[in-house]
Amino acid sequence: MISRSSQDHVRRVRRGYLLVSGLDYFADMLLTVTSVLLLQSLGMGSGAVFALIAAVWIVEGVSEIPTGVLADLLGRRVSVAISFVLRAVGYSALFFSGSVYVAAAGVLLAALGGTFASGALEAWAVDETRSEPEPEPETETEKGAGAGAGAEGARGLDRLFAQGKIAENAGLVLGTLTGAALGTLDLALPQIVAGVSCALAAVLSLRLMTGRPGPERPGPRDGFAPRLRESFGEVMTGTRLTLRGDKVLIALIIATALLWLFRGIPGVQWTVVYEGLVGGDLLVLGAMRSVGSLLEIPLLGWTMSLQRRRAAARRSVIVTASTVGALALVCATAVREPAVSIVCYVCFSTAFGLCMPGVRAAMNERIDSGHRATVLSVASLFNSLFTGGGLILTGLAVGELGSTAVAWPLAAAGFGVAGLWVGSLAVREGAGPAAGPPRSPTPTKAGLAAVGVTAAGPATAGPTAAGSPPAGVTTAGSTTAGPTAAGSKAAGSTAVGSGTVGPATAGPTTTEPTTAGSTTAGSRAAGPSTAGPTTGSQEVSAP
């Protein structure tokens, strides 16, 4: 039987997890519609905006391991609080100063802050709801009651993350629409509201993330530098062993990185483009972002059901989604009727999210469990470097931030080709991953060993695995498809804050790269580990 005190503790943990998760998404998505527009209003040209969002991707990619080591030394509760504090300062900076340099510093600080929180909140919730041992029943009556309690415990994580997804989606939609409404008054107003929300979340995380002692942490005497060197060494060694004999896996990582890049290019520009088409109505942009995210939920459920029934459905889904997405982006570029163009763009941003579960599954299938966390971390780094470098080059080629004549046809062609490449690789049979000696997982912010089996269960293919966008600058509306300027949680929206390119679930928060808070692959120990990092905390502009 589970004691009443344990039940009360689990309820408190659940409420705390849902409250902080919802507030986290709310704060990040406040900036989805207004962040790029604000940067443009401060005098940043197209090249500078593209370069800043690229910097967010790169900062998030290279900061994941060092901030993960530091988070392991400090503990989950402190790590999550630090993330919120840094994002609060970074977001608020754009409200109090009109300096371009202060704006850039704020965006990058928020992006750095997002990397402190990767997986830590989820790992805490999982440990606190699962760590209570269940006493052995003695009588027949107690056996029946104990069996019921055990079944409930087995369903507990499913319930926790289902409710968490609802809280995240509620925060996403409410934050997006609130930010759009505030932006009609002043483009900088969502920044201060996001900063205050993050400050409140920091206080709540310190207050609510309490409970049983977590995994034993190394003492200060172990030192940061030695552990950092050890972590980098594990990443390089494990990746070399795993990739040495599997060229298909290497091709999958590169092709997936290209998908992220070509999804991120329109993500930087969409708010500027559609602001002009809808006559400056930011509420329409907010609706675009919200509808695209919510539309992914039933479609992802349908594609997962299809893949369970048909072995070849994974390739069909990826190829079809990428082809339709490429054609939709071409139509969005060519059509001048605002309503039609908006529908086409939402279709494009949604198509990316539909590709991701199959891509993550294919990647996970080719990685042995002993090296899963390291290989997925390297895949995330590839995504960051490819997208960052590609955005810099695109910014040099784009004359005006609202001009799509060059960038969007290029992105459409690249997205379609990369999707066909990924689709062919996702079903190709070949040599399994190279065998390697067992190794301890790379330290992650979640603090759990996210190497193939997460605290919630075996790693599954989800849209937030390898290659989630940086948190902070969301670029294209859908939840994990576009870079966000400061940690956006959902791919596709770009905002100056911490991003969410999305949670690691098959929901609307994994379609757009964000730039300030991406979750590294394998570090999410709270739920099924998908194939890569989930996105971060905020966005710079993407529906």
Image (tube, grey):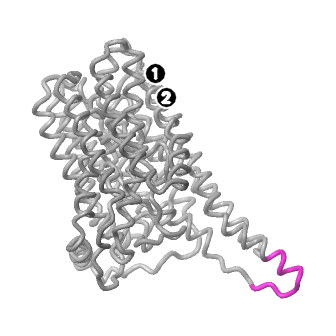
Q: Judging from the image, what secondary structure is the residue with disc 1 in?
A: helix
Q: Position of residue 285 (x, y in %)?
A: 41, 24
Residue 413 appears in which quarter of the rendering?
Answer: top left
- For residue 316, say whether it is visible: yes
Neighbourhood count class around disc 2 (C-alpha, 10 Å): few under 14, some 14–19, many 20 upward? many
Nearest the viewer among 421 and 429 is 429
Q: Are marks 2 and 1 in contact (CB under 8 Å)?
A: yes
Report the span colored magenta.
Answer: 136-146
Q: Is residue 371 above or below residue 171?
A: below
Q: Is residue 273 above or below residue 77?
A: above
Q: Judging from the image, what secondary structure is the residue with disc 2 in?
A: helix
Is 245 left, or right, of 183 in this rendering? left
Neighbourhood count class around disc 1 (C-alpha, 10 Å): few under 14, some 14–19, many 20 upward? many
Specify whether residue 144 is painted magenta: yes
Identify which residue is drawn at 43% across, 38% down: 29
Q: Which residue is mark 2?
A: 177
Q: Quarter of the image containing the C terminus? A: top left
- Disc ID at residue 91: none
Q: Is residue 252 above or below residue 194?
A: below
Q: CA distance from mark 2 to mark 1?
A: 7 Å
Q: Which residue is mark 1?
A: 283
Residue type for callout 1: Leu
Residue at the bottom extreme, as displayed: 138
| Badge count | 2
Earlier sequence position, callout 2 versus callout 1: 2
Q: Quarter of the image containing the N terminus? A: bottom right
